[in-house]
Image: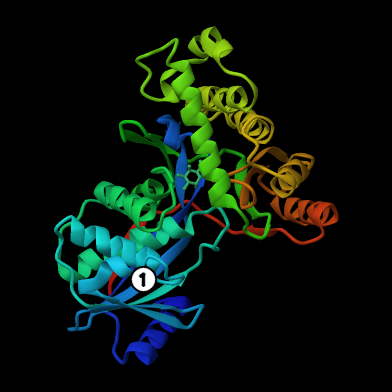
Amino acid sequence: MDHMQERAIETFQRVFGAAPAFEVSAAGRINLIGEHIDYCGGKVMPASLNLCCKVYGRANGTSLINVYADDLDETARLDLSALDTYRSLNWGRYQAGVAYELQKSGCRLVGCDLLYSCSVPFGSGLSSSAAIEVATAVALSEIAGNDYDLKETALLSQRAENEYCGVNCGIMDQFASAMGKKDRAILLDCKTLEYTYIPFELGNYELVVANCNKPHALVESKYNERRGEVEEALVRLRAVYPDAACLADLTPAMFERAKHVLSGKLLDRAEHVIYECARVKEAAAALRRGDILALARLINASHDSLSRLYEVTGKEPDALAYAARAQDGCIGSRMIGAGFGGCTISLVEKGKVAAFKKAVGERYRNAVGYDATFYDTSIEDGVTVRKL
Ligand code: GLA
């Protein structure tokens, strides 16, 4: 038993007066490429991280789900007969949303005590909310003795986030959290939910995840604005391609023939989506054949497109990505997730990572006035369940 687990079990005993019966964990994620593509029906390439949300739990014989956050020292009590009423909770609404969706889909729920210990930093763009949702869905199913399917768990978790919590996200985060595999990237088609795993082998390079630590602001409203823009772009492009079900249905060649129906921001947004989809295809091929230099070029092009055309980067993610790219040994860097802050991924030559962190950290602080955070990451299984 590791130190963190020991501490969590002690806390569980102090807070709930008994020992937990199991530990469930669900991962945060990175995304190699395919940004702002999931809700356009294209392919994305996420991978699940060692940074994860751990839930310790046991049935408590009541009709309450008690959810305790170890870092907030706060408990939310969710009544099984009133799960619809917790939408405005700050702590506990993701769990309530998942419980509500499980109940709505006919799953039996039982009262329980749950302790959350999350190493995915909140607001980092590494999907702490998806990790909480997926971990909760698995924990509640385990406690009630229900069978569950991880793909369905991802969809249910996304529903909880969309409908209960009012965040209009796509499927990428929950899918990566639930379906991720150790040392694999997932190539996920967000239109069909077909997926394959690609070995996450970077040869002579390492993946470095860095948080620009920009205070969270307006991410949701800007995210929704982008969704609105690409929906509008699709409506206009249908004048030329009436059968297009989503933007990702158009190849670059088709887009070039039709783009005269768009202008201004709508043209920029659609151009990002169309060419990012093409980059994902090339990136999957590059990763499969171990061509990390080609992968890095695509990662850089993805960031530049997110910055220039999709306009979801901003000063801090740009500063971090460009500081990374200027550093010896770094062959590619880009922002990941929704943007407007959050994390970057960089591909850095092995043996040059410590110097990279130091130099990029300094350059970033000089540019924005505060520090970035670098994480030690590895690609791990999305969900694990351990009986205690
Ligand atoms: C957030 C959303 C995802 C996805 C990314 C952008 O992480 O939750 O569904 O849209 O932004 O790629």
Q: Residue 98, can we see it?
A: yes
Please state, as top left, top right, bottom left or bottom right, where the N terminus lies in the image.
Answer: bottom left
Tell me what residue is drawn at x 43 percent, y 54 percent: 380
x, y (%) of residue 261?
55, 13
251 left or right of 342 in image: left
Q: Is residue 166 above or below residue 325?
A: below
x, y (%) of residue 366?
85, 55
Kindly state the secondary structure of the residue where label 1 is placed.
strand
Q: Residue furthest right?
A: 366
71 left or right of 165 in image: right
Q: Is residue 215 above or below residue 346?
A: below
Q: Quadrant of residue 122?
A: bottom right
Q: Is residue 96 above or below residue 105?
A: below
Name the amino acid, label 1. Val
x, y (%) of residue 386?
29, 69
For disc 1, the neighbor class at 10 Å (few under 14, some 14 to 19, many from 20) is many
Q: Residue furthest top?
A: 257
Q: Quadrant of residue 166?
A: bottom left
Q: Which residue is mark 1?
A: 55
Please state, as top left, top right, bottom left or bottom right, where the C terminus lies in the image.
Answer: bottom left
Tell me what residue is drawn at x 71 percent, y 43 percent: 321
Q: Residue 388, can we see it?
A: no
Q: Nearer the viewer, residue 354 or 249?
A: 249
